[in-house]
Image (spheres, helix red, strand yellow):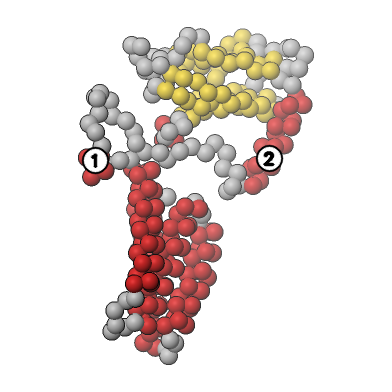
């Protein structure tokens, strides 16, 4: 979830919570403690089920829940201390949670949009003209926390793959250089050392630092058991690789890492 979406959900939640507080304050005879309990129960009863149906990550859930619960506490104090000054104890607690929430929202924003604006001005000037990408959306090839069925299916596939005994060799014909077409080769042989022909071979290069640069490809058969594709890597550095080989319902998957050099080095 992007920062704009996060702030929109928080803003809507705060608005609804304030409306509920006003209804309780002026249309009921509940005291401040009772109103705080009702507000917190309303947050739990509405926000948690909605979050489970629209899961956006544990960090986002924690930020939103913390804001809504702290707001309920603050409104309870406001209702109880109306017309008087705050005690330093509750004020420190509220300030602490407000700081924690602000820091977490800042981290989420930096992870998605990178270091920009005032944060960029605080950093030293770069020594080269190349601009580093400070975003870190990350990459999750198998999100088992969201899809338990996918995890169980993957375990079954691994067991079948080990029993099948296929052997896979892969690599570049020459060392890969960014922006230059290179041949990527793959050889598949079965447990009897016979070439595995007639398979459908596809793969994905995954950029660990930024999933927006991930790209997929398909390989064509070259000779019995051999598959080839010409690729042009868009960025230098480390790439993760996932290759899937499928033949008549048998699926074999391998994972690897490759490093791409900068042109001219």
Q: Is residue 166 above or below residue 11?
A: above
Question: Is residue 114 toward the left or the right of residue 143 in the image?
Answer: left
Q: Is residue 16 visible?
A: no
Left or right side of 193 for 229: left
**Can residue 55 be seen at all in this image of the molecule?**
yes
Quarter holding residue 201: top right
Report the Cα–Cα distance between label 2 and label 1. 48 Å
The circle drawn on residue 153 is 2
Looking at the image, residue 17 sits to the left or right of residue 146; the answer is left
Q: Nearer the viewer, residue 226 or 27?
A: 27
Label 2 or label 1, whichever lies nearer to me, is: 1
Q: Position of residue 68 (x, y in %)?
A: 42, 67
Say which residue appears at 70% left-offset and 32% top-offset. 158
The residue that mark 1 highlights is 122
Position of residue 161 measured from the top left corner of the image (x, y, whole percent): 71, 28
State the residue at coordinates (43%, 58%). 63
* Front-lying residue, 110 or 191: 110
Badge 2 marks a residue whose secondary structure is: helix
Quarter of the figure with the C terminus: top left
**Relative vertical location of residue 149 with respect to residue 54 in this rendering, above or below:** above
- In the image, 52 versus 221, the foreground residue is 52
The kind of secondary structure element at disc 1 is helix
Mark positioned earlier in the residue sequence (2 or 1): 1
Q: Residue at x 56, y 24 (%)?
A: 256
Q: Position of residue 105 (x, y in %)?
A: 37, 53
């Amino acid at each position: 979830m992007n920062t704009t979406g996060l702030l929109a959900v928080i803003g809507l939640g705060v608005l609804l919570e304030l409306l509920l507080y006003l209804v309780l304050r002026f249309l009921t005879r509940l005291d401040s403690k009772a109103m705080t309990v009702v507000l917190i129960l309303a947050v739990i009863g509405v926000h948690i089920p909605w979050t489970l149906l629209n899961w956006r990550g544990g960090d986002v859930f924690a930020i939103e829940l913390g804001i809504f619960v702290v707001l309920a506490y603050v409104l309870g104090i406001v209702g109880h201390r109306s017309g008087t000054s705050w005690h330093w104890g509750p004020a420190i607690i509220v300030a602490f949670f407000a700081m924690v929430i602000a820091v977490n929202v800042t981290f989420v924003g930096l992870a998605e949009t990178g270091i920009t604006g005032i944060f960029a001005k605080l950093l030293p000037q770069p020594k080269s003209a190349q601009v580093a990408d400070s975003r870190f959306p990350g990459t999750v090839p198998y999100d088992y926390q969201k899809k338990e069925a996918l995890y169980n299916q993957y375990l079954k596939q691994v067991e079948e793959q080990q029993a099948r005994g296929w052997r896979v060799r892969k690599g570049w014909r020459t060392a890969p250089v960014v922006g230059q077409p290179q041949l990527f080769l793959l050889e598949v042989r079965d447990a009897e050392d016979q070439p595995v022909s007639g398979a459908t071979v596809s793969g994905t290069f995954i950029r660990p630092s930024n999933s927006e640069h991930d790209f997929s490809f398909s390989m064509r058969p070259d000779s019995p058991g051999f598959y080839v594709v010409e690729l042009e890597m868009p960025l230098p550095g480390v790439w993760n690789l996932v290759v899937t080989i499928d033949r008549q319902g048998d699926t074999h998957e391998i994972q690897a890492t490759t490093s791409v050099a900068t042109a001219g080095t």
